[in-house]
Image (cartoon, helix red, strand yellow):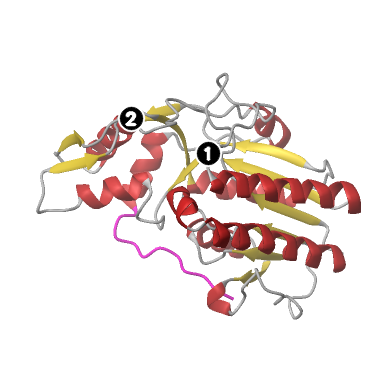
């Protein structure tokens, strides 16, 4: 099975490629490091494949307000170019990694039919890409699956995200404090190893229920304070947690996914709750994280 993956040098992509290599799949990694700028027409030499997994995107929400033009170019145009390449080359399956696009929830847990209440350019760019994917599925009969992961965590993540922020401060021997903006918001955290397994299952599913939208999470929420406290306990570090800010405008107090549909369709459940995920991270502390290109 030949699979084209974009963003293969990123956080999720590195873990996914390592797993798919272990399954014997033939992987074509389209990354900037390999000379592929997906916002330009650079796919002539890529050829066909059995499937595409489109991970590449601008992903840090605060940046989306600083440079929205580049955000929309990177996220929307790259998705359009890849969809068109897939259509022209008869690629049978297209998996698009979207994001949390629900905004402040009207109810919990959040299922795939929940209203979309996005309030930032990043989320809107993802919804535009979802709409584009659905158009290609309906107009050209492409088998397209849209996945909406909630909060993914694990080694190799951008240092600006929550878990790396906590870990970096926890490992700082020159400070006895961990300072975080707000300790109260609650989120649904999915361990990277669980995400990789369900993406593998989605990739290999023979059915053609298209377009499909899938929520991916653990199905339970934890506060920022919960996460920091659990991490300090697992890493056997004693530090004081300090809240340095107040509640942000439009802050979401609590959100977690209803994953009943994906569990039933793919016979999948997350193997790592937050405690087990953090323990697995601790056991692999010091290992170099994967950086795969091909």
Magenta stretch: residue 180 in it? no
Q: CA distance from mark 1 to mark 2?
A: 21 Å
Residue 24 visible (yes or no): no
Q: What quarter of the picture does the N terminus occupy?
A: bottom right
Magenta stretch: dominant SS?
Answer: loop
Stretch in magenta: 284-294
Look at mark 2 in the image and give the residue it sits on: 247
**Which residue is nearer to you in this view: 223 or 3?**
223
* Residue in the image at 61% along x and 41% along y: 148
Q: Which mark is residue 150?
A: 1
Is 265 drawn above or below residue 131 in the view shown? above
Up-down relation of residue 48 to residue 113 (above or below): below
Task: In the rendered structure, find residue 112 and report the number of the disc placed on it.
Answer: none
Q: Residue 294 lies in what quarter of the image?
A: bottom right
Residue 273: name its quadrant.
top left
Horizontally, residue 174 falls left or right of residue 146, namely left
Q: Give the class, few, some or many, for how many residues have Cα within 10 Å of label 1's Cα (few <14, many ≥20).
A: many
Along the viewing direction, whichever of 36 and 25 lies nearer the viewer: 36
| Label 2: how many Cα within 10 Å (few below 14, some 14–19, many 20+) | few
Q: Is residue 289 magenta?
A: yes
For residue 221, above or below residue 69: above
Is 276 positioned to the left or the right of 65 in the image?
A: left
Nearer the camera: disc 1 or disc 2 = 2
Residue at the image position 34 percent from the left and 62 percent from the top: 287
Which residue corresponds to the image point at 71% horizontal and 52% vertical from the top-left? 95
Report the front residue among 272 and 218. Answer: 218
């Amino acid at each position: 099975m030949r699979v084209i993956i974009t963003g293969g040098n990123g956080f999720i992509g590195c873990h996914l490629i390592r797993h798919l290599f272990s399954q014997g799949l033939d992987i074509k990694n389209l990354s900037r490091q390999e000379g592929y700028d997906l916002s330009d027409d650079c796919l002539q030499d890529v050829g066909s494949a059995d499937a595409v997994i489109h991970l590449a995107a601008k992903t840090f929400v605060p940046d989306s307000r600083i440079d929205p033009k580049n955000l929309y170019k990177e996220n929307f145009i790259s998705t359009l170019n890849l969809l068109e390449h897939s259509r022209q080359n008869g690629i049978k399956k297209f998996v698009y990694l979207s994001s949390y696009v629900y905004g402040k929830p009207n109810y919990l847990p959040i299922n795939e039919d929940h209203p979309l209440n996005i309030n930032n350019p990043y989320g809107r760019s993802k919804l535009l890409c979802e709409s584009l994917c659905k158009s290609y599925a309906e107009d050209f009969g492409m088998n397209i699956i849209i996945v909406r992961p909630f909060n993914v965590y694990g080694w190799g993540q951008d240092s600006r995200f929550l878990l790396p922020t906590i870990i970096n401060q926890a490992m700082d021997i020159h400070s006895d404090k961990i300072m975080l903006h707000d300790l109260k918001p609650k989120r649904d955290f999915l361990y990277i190893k669980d995400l990789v397994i369900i993406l593998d299952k989605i990739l290999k599913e023979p059915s053609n229920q298209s377009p499909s939208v899938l929520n991916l999470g653990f199905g339970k929420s934890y506060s920022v304070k919960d996460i920091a406290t659990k991490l300090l306990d697992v890493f056997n570090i004693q530090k004081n947690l300090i809240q340095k800010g107040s509640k942000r405008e439009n802050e979401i107090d609590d959100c977690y996914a209803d994953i009943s549909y994906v569990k039933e369709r793919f016979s999948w459940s997350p193997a790592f709750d937050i405690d087990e995920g953090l323990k697995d991270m601790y056991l692999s502390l010091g290992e170099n994280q994967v950086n795969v290109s091909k």
